[in-house]
Amino acid sequence: MKAYPYRRLAGPVSLRVTAVELKVPGESREPLDTKAFSVVEQVVALGGTGFDDWESARLKLSATIPSKATAPDSGWSDVSVVAVLTEKATNARTVVPLESTTESGREWTGFLDVWRADHRDRASLSVHVVARADGVPGRVIATAQNEWIVDLSAEAPRRQRELDVVIAGFREGPQWRRPFREVPWIVDTSGDVAAVHVNTDFEGLTDLLSGSGSGVEGLVRDLLLAQMCTDVWTAVFHAAVGDLEVEEDGTPLFPHDWRGEVLREMLPDVMPGRPLEEALGEVHRRRTEAAGWIDLQPRIHFAATRRAEMPKALSTTIRGLDRLQQRADA
Amino acid sequence: MTHKPNYLPERLALLSDLNAAQYVTEGLLNGKEDVPAIALSKIVEPLPYDGARAALAPVRELVDDAMCEYRDEKPTKADAWLAPRLHATLRLNRREAADRRLWNFLALGVAPDYVVWRFLPEPNGKEKSGEAPKVAYRRFRGAHYTQAFARLWWMAELFRNGSDYRPVARACAIQDMINTVLRLDVIDHRPTAQAMVRLLDRGTVTTGREVNALAGAVNASAATLMYDVVAPDVERDGRPVQEWVEAAETAGPVPRRMLPEGPDEEQAPEGSVEALADYFTELLVDAPVRGRPATEDIGD
């Protein structure tokens, strides 16, 4: 628990995006369909809007805070509610004040403009309640429990990221991929999002993957996909842990992009029962120092297999093969 | 020493982390090898934009001038000269600047000799036996606050006050502003960045150790205090940067003696900057400075 030198506001603070409008240069603002954002997922997706040249997006916001904040005997004064949009990759920070719309001081609304050129990938949107406390102005007395994500490229508002899948022949295309022309797929972890490259030069692979057959082919396909996912999870974990920024005292930092998300997701399985920061420190120590890295491999494998739902895929395949066998016997 | 590449394409390009890695060799880090320029040019990807901003020559000439101008001085001195000029030559928006592939390409495909010149440490007798001094890997490929060119561009972007690059030159004159302050999230709020430079102007902060103490205090205080509310910035407007980017087509080379002019954005409100500068001065009184006795009589 963090200690504050002043009284904080207890109770839930929540934020909702109620509408999104796009601005294309030279035209008026165009309201977006409600499927561009999701209140359940708390994500705004600006990638599937149908406008290629949009310049900014206006998010209409609504926040709800406990009415205690503005009660006359609260001890706080000059209460304000601000929405903050940040993105680590671009060091962008936009702050807008919201306005109180009800007598009770519970509902606050406003809007925030997201400038496309200021963002690259995913920005976080949060809301804070700020007030004068014990004579000190500008104290943060409460922060919303959940942050919204503003995703610049996603077509659908989902929190969970999707993998980039590149389907191409490895004999052509980028130089680095050519030596791998004999393997069915390869995982590239160097970009903004991890990508799996599927080799169309591998004969029959695309047919197998795109087929919808329910027989043996279907079973093999599902198993193959699970195997591919296991590879991806293993690769992204190694990529994330292998490229950590380290503080001067040797403490590793969580990366800002998908690498950070991968670590937060997998570390609880790799280093069970430890707080995330500590787990990251331990994994980093084991990787860079003489001992312990080898011992960790089964745990990384376990974490990847679990996420790829490999056990489920394999049991389904085995059971499916049994059934096909029975049918053949009959 | 590592030489200027023997082949320079006409256009800037992108070089992915994966492809960059194989060219950051021990020999290059030691400043003993060159980057195979032709091979590198075959694995790069094209920029998402074209036109004057994509030309390679102006960037290379600028780097040449920096190395020539500061050949008899410490290479660190070149940062204050190069940062605003690099920013005004590339004319990127933040979306473009957040693409690490561009910085990888500048460091390996345009000016690996600059990276070695700027970051190869002088032998100081502290090396482990048999180990030659070497450039840190993160100078070629790394975060925005460590990579050789990204750090200069982001210093310029985060410390310019609208079109005024003077605060950038001021901030770059103390290496700890780049090494410590640039990585803090608090400077993403423009009045906060300007207020820190203001303390350099006022002479309240003069040494690297004081900068580090200031950074620590400002950052810690931001955990409970919202600078954006006590010292508001103007409303964000993305158009001036857009116009500045478009004006690249008609802009000549950046001035070498005078400072260039940045995007015509509204400046951080003076009242906000002053208020924060005063507040930071108070914080600094109580902040521990390495090497400064924790007594009342400081100053001499």
Image: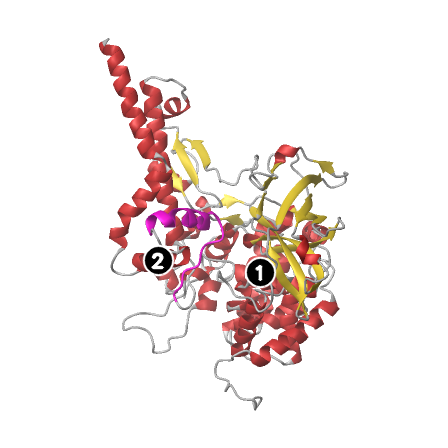
Q: Secondary structure at mark 1?
A: helix
Q: Answer yes or no: is residue A174 visible.
A: yes
Residue B195 position within the rendered picture, expressed as x and y whole percent measured from the top left: 65, 70
Q: Which residue is mark 2?
A: A284
Which chain does the numbered disc 2 sit on?
A: A
Q: Regarding mark 2 in the picture, which secondary structure is present there?
A: helix
The residue positioned 66% from the left and 48% from the top of the image is A64
Mark 1 Cα within 10 Å, few/some/many (few <14, many 20+)?
many
Q: Which mark is residue A185?
A: none
User: Residue B94: x, y in percent?
Assistant: 60, 53
The picture places residue B57, in percent across and down from the top left corner, at 57, 55
Q: What is the quadrant of residue A73 in the picture?
A: bottom right
The foreground one among A187 and A263 is: A263
What is the span of residues highlighted in magenta in the rendered image?
A: A250-271
Give the quarter of the image for residue B188: bottom right
Which residue bears the numbered disc 1?
A: B154
Q: CA distance from mark 1 to mark 2?
A: 28 Å
Give residue A203's quadrant in the image.
Answer: top left
Q: Is residue A264 magenta?
A: yes
Is residue B77 visible in this depiction of the protein?
A: no
Would you place residue B177 above or below residue A165 in this image? below
